[in-house]
Amino acid sequence: MPRYSGDGLRHHPHSFMNDSQTERIHAALDRFEIETPSWGFADTGTRFGKFLQDAAAIDINDKLADAGQVHAFTGFCPTVALHVLWDFRPGQSASEVVQLGRKNGVRIGAINPNLFQDQIYKYGSLCNRDPDVRAQAVKHLLESGELAKQTGSRLISIWLGDGSNYPGQSNIRWRKRALAETLRPLHESLNPEQLILLEYKPFEPAFYHTDLADWGMAYVVAKEVGPKAKVLVDTGHHYLSQNIEQIVAWLLDTDMLGGFHFNDRRYADDDLTFGSIDPYQAFRIFHEIHYFGWETSRAQTIPYMIDQSHIDKPKIEAMIQTAVVAQDLYARAAAVDHEKLARHQERNEQIDAEECIRQAFFADIRPLILEWRKARNLPLDPLAAFRESGYEKRIASERKTRRAELGITASGSYA
Ligand code: PSV
Ligand code: MN
């Protein structure tokens, strides 16, 4: 029977959990952080159009303020990823942005160069056959690396829109070679703590071939570029039935896992809320990470980032919901009894091995999460507390007026 204590917390007997599992969940909760993306607070849409939300962030001020809210109510989202062209006004100083973050209780996280939006990139950026375009793209990467240094960011997170739309259009091998060559200058300019994260994606915006289409291609190019280049796994960037946790396991084992972009999908790169469609998939990814940590005793410093587009969902609430789900799944995966699992695996005891995983997935770890929040003076229900704060209502009215003054109307573009 669950017991209720005077402080309103529910103490559960954690029926199947032993002390070491409970300890591991505590440690996982203490360790877990997840980065929010600035663009997840702004109006986005699909290629068919964009619906404006009164409360959506208009500029970097708003984005950092909203990210600050997510961190204040959850306690584990201290950094914000920025997209260079979407966030920095031309000539805006990095220190001003750092200050803005500080004012709102957040730090600057990954810096995302933008190599996909300018007209010059119609036929690619780093893989463009025109040397002037490649030079422009390299220059943008170097400027982004500099921005990362100035904002104290360790990560330059690169996603390429490069690819082609029709068979025969491009020399795929030539383009592959161009990648290593154009990424090296950035690599050489990094300081020892910084990393390049290479994000792969099999399609979109190009629909015949993408230059970094899968983890293997990103791995090969990262190796060619140098030791400060790693692979970034965006959970939405795989074919539907692909075993993502196996990719994660291989990247861990080869020391090439650079970080994650988390989101969920039903069909393609849908950018839906992480864990909303297939929480077991997310859990299995976290399980591989914990299992690796147990086996190797290597410290876990994997950058976890959210990359979602809350087209018609209230954005700050969606971000809180996502973070809370990610924390829950991460902690839950820490409940797997690794010793037991390893023993069952060695003996090919399938049912028992699988039960180790399933029991953790279905365990009720909420009491432990509530304890963790209580110990940190965080609201026991971050979403409810955020709603009660009235923040969204306030910003909705202020931003609606400002949007009108600025003449911002819905456009046909994605972001
Ligand atoms: C591309 O689909 C992507 O996943 C990249 O990470 C971009 O930076 C991001 O989406 C933009 O929303
Ligand atoms: Mn992404």
Image (cartoon, helix red, strand yellow):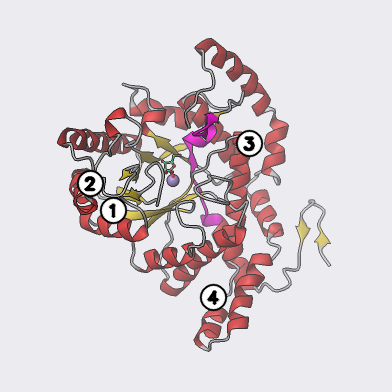
SS state under label 4: helix
How many numbered marks, from 0 up? 4
Whichever of labels 3 and 4 marks the residue nearer the N terminus, that label is: 3
Residue receiving disc 1: 229
Callout 2 crowding tier (Cα within 10 Å): few <14, some 14–19, many ≥20: many
Q: Residue 349: tell me if it is visible.
A: yes
Mark pair 1, 3: CA separation: 35 Å
Callout 1, which amino acid?
A: Ala
Residue 11: % across, % down: 76, 61
Callout 3, which amino acid?
A: Lys
Residue at 34 percent across and 35 percent down: it is 114
Q: In this view, does 269 lie above or below 398?
A: below
Residue 385: % across, % down: 70, 38
Mark pair 1, 2: CA separation: 9 Å
Callout 1 crowding tier (Cα within 10 Å): few <14, some 14–19, many ≥20: many
Left/right placement of residue 321 relative to residue 200 reads right
Number of the front mark, 1 or 3: 3
Callout 4, which amino acid?
A: His
Do tag 2 and tag 3 residues touch (Cβ < 8 Å)?
A: no
> Taking the image as four quarters, which one is ligand 1 found in?
top left
Mark pair 4, 2: CA separation: 39 Å
SS state under label 2: helix
State the residue in front, 154 or 357. Answer: 357
Q: Give the range drawn in magenta.
A: 30-49
Q: Which mark is residue 338?
A: 4
Q: Kindly tell me whether mark 4's CB lies below 8 Å from ligand 2.
A: no
Q: Which mark is residue 183?
A: 2
Residue at 62 percent across and 82 percent down: it is 352
Callout 2, which amino acid?
A: Leu
Q: Residue 15 carries which label?
A: none
Whichever of labels 2 and 3 marks the residue nearer the N terminus, that label is: 2
